Amino acid sequence: MTRQGNRRRTGRLNGLTIRLLIAAAIAAFSLITYFSSGSVNPVTGEKQHVSISPDQEIAMGVNAAPSMAQQYGGLHPDQEAQAFVKRVGQRIIANSSAKDSPYNYQFHLLADNRTINAFALPGGQVFITAALLSKLESEAQLAGILGHEIGHVIGRHGAEHMAKQKLTQGLISAVGVGTDPNLGRMAASVGQLINMKYGRNDELESDEFGIVLMSEAGYDPRAMIGVMDILESSSGGARQPEIMSSHPNPGNRREQIKITIGKIFPNGVPNGLIP
Ligand SMILES: [Zn+2]
């Protein structure tokens, strides 16, 4: 009796051990995959965990652009407004350090006149909705928003996020093989935490990029403070705009923007910049 009971327990234990070993192997594999996919960002010089090349980022963005546009009612039919967004975007690229990045930038005005949003796909596809454009009071404010989105492209935040997602999925499926369902939930929330934390840093980095790029292109960077006011007063909607997402709070962000402007122009913002 006792021996049989022991054997049964041993049998269960072996099964559990094997599952845990498999879980450990999957976790180790996803960690190795993540940490071996490092590459140095050619613009920021930062070591990043990205598993795709800039060419693949461009191809991915170009492929995804039409379906992304479709989610916001397609491209805006007003060709003049469309050309205005493209002109401001290309002015930033042509006159800033963004031209040294390996990406193919294209700027699109989306027809959606209810959803306040702007976003970028990996490789350089940048979008702004008609709803957000209609709230803006100046060309420099548009330049600030497009500069922020160009910042996400140069920072390779999309590709980085994807590499991270792969890591998170690997870790979740690893504990899924293990026994305790709570462990699975824990890994899922840890994964979210990783992504949230990176999201905040990505937004702050993009704000800084945006301010540098717009200033290089001759736009008054103080316009970005006005953009924060506009986003804050219109963030009551159900859909959180990309440009407002995962941030500490708008107050902190405004302070950071002022600090960055002070770094670029230590003697004060000069006259004659495009408002
Ligand atoms: Zn952003």
Image (cartoon, rainbow, N blue to C red):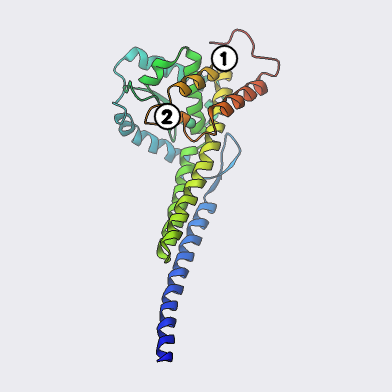
For numbered disc 2, what is the local secondary structure?
loop
Q: Nearer the viewer, residue 180 or 133?
A: 180
Mark 1 vs mark 2, CA separation in Å = 23 Å
For numbered disc 1, what is the local secondary structure?
loop
The answer to whether marks 1 and 2 mark residues whose Cβ atoms lie closer than 8 Å is: no
The percent position of residue 199, horizontal first and vertical second, equals: 51, 38
Tell me the number on the disc at residue 7: none
Count residues near mark 1 (Cα–Cα under 10 Å), then give few for <14, some for 14-19, many for 20+. many
Tell me the number on the disc at residue 220: 1
| Residue under the image location 53 percent in, 41 percent down | 198
The percent position of residue 183, horizontal first and vertical second, equals: 46, 60
The verdict on label 2 being within 8 Å of ligand 1 is no
Q: Which residue carries the number 2 mark?
A: 241
Count residues near mark 2 (Cα–Cα under 10 Å), then give few for <14, some for 14-19, many for 20+. some
Q: Is residue 235 visible?
A: yes
Which amino acid type is marked by label 2? Pro
Question: In this picture, is 2 found above or below 161?
Answer: below
The verdict on label 1 being within 8 Å of ligand 1 is no
77 horizontally vs 242: left or right? left
Furthest toward the front, the residue is 1
Marks 1 and 2: which is nearer the front? 2
Corner quadrant of residue 96: top right
Corner quadrant of residue 58: top left
| Residue under the image location 49 percent in, 36 percent down | 246
Q: Is residue 126 visible?
A: no
Q: Answer with mark 1 or mark 2, whichever residue precedes in sequence.
A: 1
Q: Quadrant of the N terminus?
A: bottom left
